[in-house]
Amino acid sequence: MAINQKNLHVPLSENLYSRLRETADLTQRPATELAREAIQTWLEMKEREALREKIQEYAVKVAGTPDDLDPDLEEAAIEHLTSSRKRGRK
């Protein structure tokens, strides 16, 4: 099954282009593959950061309210952390 791909022209500084070519040569991988991987990694990082920010905003918003934390969930988390630490010491 063929994947529908789009091309993107990205002008690079001479230094960045040289570094990309050098890495491609060292790893024996195409520069386009490395660039695609770098872009994908960066986008995933930005998506994680955005999610983390949303979670943080929600946590600040509900802090001290009944929605702050489920007592049963909090107790289970404490038990899990405590038992994990005890297992780690053995």
Image (cartoon, grey):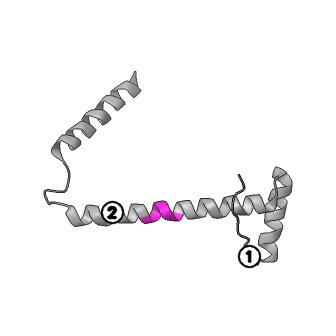
Left or right, 63 with respect to 57, comes to left
Q: Which of marks 2 and 1 is nearer the N terminus?
A: 1
Q: How far from the left and from the top, in percent, is residue 1? A: 71, 51
Identify which residue is drawn at 84% across, 53% down.
26
Quadrant where the C terminus is found in the figure: top left
Left or right, 14 with respect to 78, comes to right
Q: Relative to 28, is 80 above or below?
A: above
Point out the stretch of residues depicted in magenta. 46-50
The residue nearer to you, when weighing 17 against 34, is 34
Most common secondary structure along the magenta stretch:
helix
Identify which residue is drawn at 81% across, 53% down.
29
User: In the image, which disc is placed on residue 41?
Assistant: none
Circle 1 Cα neighbour tier, 10 Å, few/some/many (<14 / 14–19 / ≥20): few
Task: Please name the amino acid that badge 1 sits on.
Answer: Val
Residue 17 placement: quadrant: bottom right
**Within the magenta stretch, is there residue 37?**
no
Element class at badge 1:
loop
Circle 2 Cα neighbour tier, 10 Å, few/some/many (<14 / 14–19 / ≥20): few
User: In the image, which disc is placed on residue 56?
Assistant: 2
Task: Please name the amino acid that badge 2 sits on.
Answer: Gln
Q: How far from the left and from the top, in percent, is residue 32? A: 78, 63
Q: How far from the left and from the top, in percent, is residue 36? A: 70, 62
Q: Relative to 58, is 10 above or below?
A: below
Labels in figure, total: 2
User: In the image, which disc is placed on residue 10?
Assistant: 1
Q: Residue furthest front?
A: 1
Identify which residue is drawn at 47% across, 60% down.
48
Q: How far apart are marks 2 and 1 (CA)?
A: 34 Å
Element class at badge 2:
helix
The residue nearer to you, when weighing 53 against 43, is 43
Residue 74 placement: quadrant: top left
Q: How far from the left and from the top, in percent, is residue 68? A: 19, 56
